[in-house]
Each structure stands twice: as structure tokens, then as C-alpha cells.
């Protein structure tokens, strides 16, 4: 693929590293609760995004953290992004800090969607992962946003602990008026490595995908996942014939960290550049990014042999977390045991 045509349609910008919660599965191991003012650097990041917009029609910038609503400059940043013509700005938050004033500010800035992280359908389940009292505060924030006319999505990280509650979580999301709910797998990184939460095994990943497909067909709410295994056939269903789909690490997506480091995916801790000394366009076209576009040459193991290499590609962050090699196979894929190893 000619490098000048490498598509980047969304930037996931992690504004800060600080958070008011200490979730058990978080990919960030050490976090402060004290806000830090990084406005000068954040304005530099916006300049880099403006440069990129000269070459690409950047569809979306997602603002995350840490907890982005702890950042003292978040509303200034959203206004700047709107002013430079970014077509869509979303926020990913735990929603525990949202009061009426905050919800009104978000509504006034034309934020397209606020995606709220919840790990269960009630306090009993959710708060074991995200902390005592967090479910009640998050739901309160969600309702304030809805009352201000803001579209809300829910994001759930799935482990062995909460896999059994997926349908309950969908019921809750539907009841609360969310537009969508996305389920993504937990990885053994950050606080999630060696803790109380255990990642899914391959047969459980298949069950998660089966549930997502089934619930999406039968409910009014969109039930989905960002996981590339969503595009691997389950029960004979093929969802995509895309030439290059599945894992979005470096393909259509980039993550900017609070210190300017750029990652193909925030859960894949491989720095491909820093906006302090490189433009985003130069980073996208660098040799470090070749492997994400040329799966045929770079993938190893079972993913390299798979018929669904182009529409899935396996989760590169999972490969790295389990094997130390982001070119390796995705150990949580059920096809490894059922097709390549002759399992059930």
C-alpha cells in the first residue's frame, strides 16, 4: 500500500494520566488523582492535528484519559477542535464527576457522544471493579447528559468476572437510553496483570462474540465491540469482506498520550513517535507503522495463516500482552484451538 494513502480517520487523545478512580483492570498502572495543567502542550497537539487535517478528512477525535473531565482544559480543547473543523468530538469518561453545569457545558460544545465506562449492571457488580459508589455516580452523570440532549454510549471491559452479566448490562443500557453499548476484552496489562480479574479464555471470547451478535439482532440498542474477533465468523456468520479491517491499531486509528507519545493503540505500549519532534503525518508514514498495514509480510504464527487475516488480523495488543511480540498470534482467538490445534 502506498504510504501516502494510509488512512487515519480518528485520533484517540489521552489528555491526561490522572484519574479519580482506581479500576482493577486499567491498563495504566500508576495514576495520580491530582489534576495537571498541560495547556501549552495540548495546544501544540492541536496544531499537529490541524497539520494532519490538511491531508486527511479526520472524522473523529476521542478525548480520553486518565479521566478527561479531571483535565482543567478539556472544554477549551473541545472548542479549539470544533473551531479547526474536526467533524466529530467524543468524550470517554467514567461520568462520576458530571454535574448539571458540566453536562450543560458539554451540550453547548456540540460533543457528538459521551461514552461511559461501566463494568456491571448494578452497584454490586460494577463497584467490585471500579470502586464503591462509582455505579451510582456514573448513572447519575449519564442521566444528566441524557437530560441535556447528549447521546450516550456505554463501554464495558469483559473479564471472567462479568462475562455472565453481558445480557444484564445490555438491559441496563437499553433502560437508561444509551445509543450503543460496546464490549471489549480485558488484557493482562497495567493493573489487570496478576490482579483479581482474569482475562477471557478463547472459548469465552467466542461466547462473548456470539452474545454480541445475538443481542444486537434482538435489541433496539446497538450492541457492538471494537475487537477484531467481531469479524471472525461465529455460527457461520461473516460480517465483513473489507480488504483491510479488524484490528485498528495503526490502521485508521492513532493514540496520542498526555506526554505526546504516539501509539498505534493505547493498549499496545509501542511508541511510534512523539508529537514534540514529529508531525502526525511523518509518524503515520514511518517504517514503524509498516507492520500494521502489511499483514502478509509481518504477521506470525496462526494469525499469519488465517483465512481472516485481512478482515481481522488478531488483536495486536493481545499478542503483545501474552507473547511479547505484537506480530504474533492472538492467543484469545478460538480458531487457534478449533482449526489449527484440532480442538472442539
Image: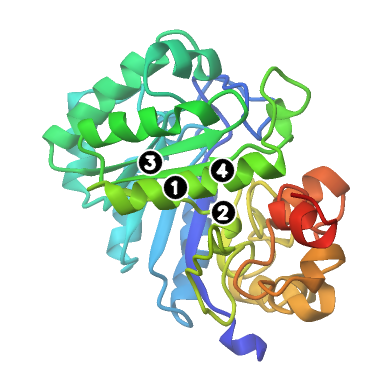
Q: Secondary structure at mark 2?
A: loop
Q: Secondary structure at mark 3?
A: helix
Coordinates of residue 75 in the picture (x, y in percent) = 32, 42
Dot 4 corresponds to which residue? 207
Q: Secondary structure at mark 4?
A: helix
Dot 2 corresponds to which residue? 227
Q: Earlier in the sequence, mark 3 or mark 1?
A: 3
Distance, label 3 to label 4, CA atoms, is 38 Å
Dot 3 corresponds to which residue? 74
Coordinates of residue 100 in the picture (x, y in percent) = 18, 25
Res 244 quadrant in image: bottom right
Q: Nearer the viewer, residue 122 or 263?
A: 122
Distance, label 4 to label 2, CA atoms, is 13 Å
Asked whether the viewer can see residue 209, the reply is: yes
Residue at figure coordinates x 21%, y 31% from the top left: 175
Colour mode of the rendering: rainbow
Res 134 quadrant in image: top left
Mark 4 or 2: in front is 4
Would you say the residues marked 4 and 1 are in contact, meaning their CB atoms lie under 8 Å apart? Answer: no
Would you say the residues marked 3 and 4 are in contact, meaning their CB atoms lie under 8 Å apart? Answer: no
Residue at figure coordinates x 31%, y 66% from the top left: 87
Would you say the residues marked 4 and 2 are in contact, meaning their CB atoms lie under 8 Å apart? Answer: no
Distance, label 3 to label 2, CA atoms, is 28 Å
Q: From this view, report whether residue 95 is shown above or below residue 337.
A: above
Q: Nearer the viewer, residue 167 or 1?
A: 167
Dot 1 corresponds to which residue? 212
Would you say the residues marked 2 and 1 are in contact, meaning their CB atoms lie under 8 Å apart? Answer: no
Amino acid at each position: 500500500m502506498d504510504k501516502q494513502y494510509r488512512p487515519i480517520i480518528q485520533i484517540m487523545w489521552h489528555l491526561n494520566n490522572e484519574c479519580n478512580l482506581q479500576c482493577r483492570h486499567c491498563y495504566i498502572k500508576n495514576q495520580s488523582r491530582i489534576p495537571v495543567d498541560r495547556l501549552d502542550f495540548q495546544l501544540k497537539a492541536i496544531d499537529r492535528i490541524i497539520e494532519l487535517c490538511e491531508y486527511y478528512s479526520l472524522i473523529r477525535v476521542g478525548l480520553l484519559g486518565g479521566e478527561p473531565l479531571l483535565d482543567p482544559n478539556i472544554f477549551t480543547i473541545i472548542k479549539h477542535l470544533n473551531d479547526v473543523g474536526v467533524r466529530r468530538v467524543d468524550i470517554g469518561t467514567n461520568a462520576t464527576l458530571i454535574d448539571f453545569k458540566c453536562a450543560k457545558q458539554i451540550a453547548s460544545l456540540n460533543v457528538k457522544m459521551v461514552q461511559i465506562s461501566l463494568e456491571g449492571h448494578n452497584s454490586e457488580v460494577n463497584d467490585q471493579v471500579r470502586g464503591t459508589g462509582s455505579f451510582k455516580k456514573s448513572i447519575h452523570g449519564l442521566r444528566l447528559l441524557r437530560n441535556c440532549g447528549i447521546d450516550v454510549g456505554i463501554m464495558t471491559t469483559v473479564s471472567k468476572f462479568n462475562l455472565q452479566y453481558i445480557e444484564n448490562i445490555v438491559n441496563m443500557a437499553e433502560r437508561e437510553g444509551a445509543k450503543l453499548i460496546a464490549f471489549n476484552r480485558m488484557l493482562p496489562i497495567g493493573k489487570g496483570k496478576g490482579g483479581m480479574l482474569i482475562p477471557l479464555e478463547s472459548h469465552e471470547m467466542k461466547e462473548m462474540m456470539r452474545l454480541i451478535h445475538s443481542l444486537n439482532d434482538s435489541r433496539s440498542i446497538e450492541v457492538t465491540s471494537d475487537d477484531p474477533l467481531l469479524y471472525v465468523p461465529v455460527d457461520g456468520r461473516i460480517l465483513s469482506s473489507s480488504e483491510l479491517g479488524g484490528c485498528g491499531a495503526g490502521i485508521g486509528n492513532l493514540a496520542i498520550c498526555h506526554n505526546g507519545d504516539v501509539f498505534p493503540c493505547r493498549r499496545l505500549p509501542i511508541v511510534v513517535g512523539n508529537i514534540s519532534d514529529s508531525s502526525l503525518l511523518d509518524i503515520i508514514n514511518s517504517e514503524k507503522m509498516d507492520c500494521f498495514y502489511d499483514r502478509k509480510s509481518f504477521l506470525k504464527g496462526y494469525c499469519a495463516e488465517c483465512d481472516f487475516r485481512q478482515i481481522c488480523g488478531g488483536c495486536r495488543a493481545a499478542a503483545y500482552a501474552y507473547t511479547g511480540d505484537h506480530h504474533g498470534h492472538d492467543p484469545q482467538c478460538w480458531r487457534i484451538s478449533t482449526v489449527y490445534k484440532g480442538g472442539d
